[in-house]
Image: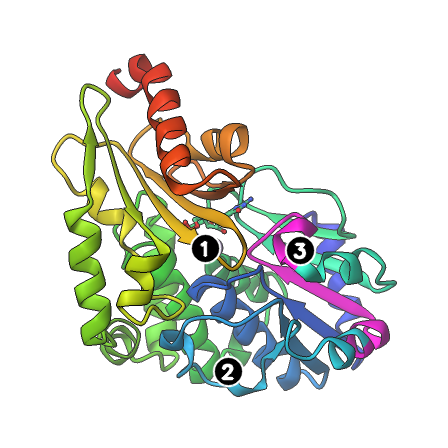
Amino acid sequence: MTTQEIADLKKLLDTPTDIVIVPHKNPDGDAIGSCLALHHFLKEKGHTSYVIAPNDYPDFLKWLPGEKEVIKFDQEIDKSKKIIDKAQLIFTLDFNHFSRTGTMEETLQNASATFAMIDHHQQPDDYAEFTYSDVSCSSTCQMVYHFIEKLEETNKISSVIATCLYIGIMTDTGSFRFPSTSSTTHRVIADLIDKGAENALIHQQTFDTNSYERLQLLGVALNNLTIIEGCNTAYICLSQKELDDHQFKKGDTEGFVNYGLSVKGIIFAAIFIEHKAENIIKISLRSKGDFNVNEFAREYFEGGGHINAAGGKSDKNLQETIAYFEDIVKKHQKKLNS
Ligand code: 5GP
Ligand code: MN
């Protein structure tokens, strides 16, 4: 974002207005954390602000301050459309293509509001009047912090805002261990702790939430872990039946894909999860080093994301998807061994 754009947006935010904030479909900690942080900040500045998520999110995000104010588009379509119609300004956070909002896509496309994007994913679309894109940044939450810095209003970061920003930085960096964690990330985190984010408590409230069934499901996933010999690749699959047998709830498979990547020598890991209701296989991809899973997801699985973390989907069945995956992985064998 240029200095001029910052000045323009600052001016726009000087007068109270109707604002909507939107995360991507199946929002994660970074998406919900950044939306709620910005929501609290804008309300503090006197705006009327709404967070409208395309759909629901995991229970482990439901302790976040202000979470109960989040409207779910798929549960309250008419109300959501009315609010979007009235909005002067729409912030889209943690995504950069309208298609990432699922059934909300058309409503956003037809909205007359000014759009502002804050996002750290690769290859942003150009739908927004204000685009703040930084693919090197750890998280959208860190970017929201820098955005508030650019507005010269970090004094408005309350303990509630600090908590919301902390959770997104924590979850998107794998608790501060992925390469996107920079010294600046740590400086931002330090300031958020100073402003009242209770780090140990936030960690507990987010991660110490396992149900017995989720841990049993993890056991099944680990049992299904397969290594593709000679390709430094590992994958996990979970069928709908395996999910049903363990009373699967949204968010239960979060982080499973990382176990594949933790096997010594593995640089590429995937998880394939059957979604009978949508008739798709949802895919998460992770890598270490130069192997670009954003490109891989775009080329083969109608998806995208970051260089080391991306997602996509397949319309084939589970077995066919895995056979297809094994085939294309073998085509990339040289790259996976370099
Ligand atoms: P996850 O595997 O945790 O769902 O997502 C990893 C990263 O890829 C996240 O940054 C997420 O926003 C992105 N991502 C996940 N699924 C998709 C998808 O279907 N399309 C695109 N473009 N990005 C995705
Ligand atoms: Mn993110």
Asked whether the beta carbons under mark 3 and mark 1 sit within 8 Å of each other, the answer is no
Residue at 44% over, 69% down = 165
Question: Circle 2 — which element?
Answer: helix
Circle 2 crowding by C-alpha within 10 Å: few under 14, some 14–19, many from 20: some
Real-space Cα separation, disc 2 to disc 1, in angstroms: 26 Å
Horizontal and vertical percent position of residue 75? 64, 78
Mark seen at residue 275 = 1
Q: Nearer the viewer, mark 3 or mark 1?
A: 1
Label 3 CB-ligand 2 distance < 8 A:
no
Real-space Cα separation, disc 3 to disc 2, in angstroms: 21 Å
Horizontal and vertical percent position of residue 266? 20, 32
Position above or below: 207 against 279: below
Q: Nearer the viewer, residue 275 or 103?
A: 275
Mark seen at residue 67 = 2
**Furthest residue toward top:** 334
Kind of residue sitting beneath label 2 = Glu
Residue at 51% over, 60% down = 277
The residue pinned by badge 3 equals: 117
Kind of residue sitting beneath label 3 = Met
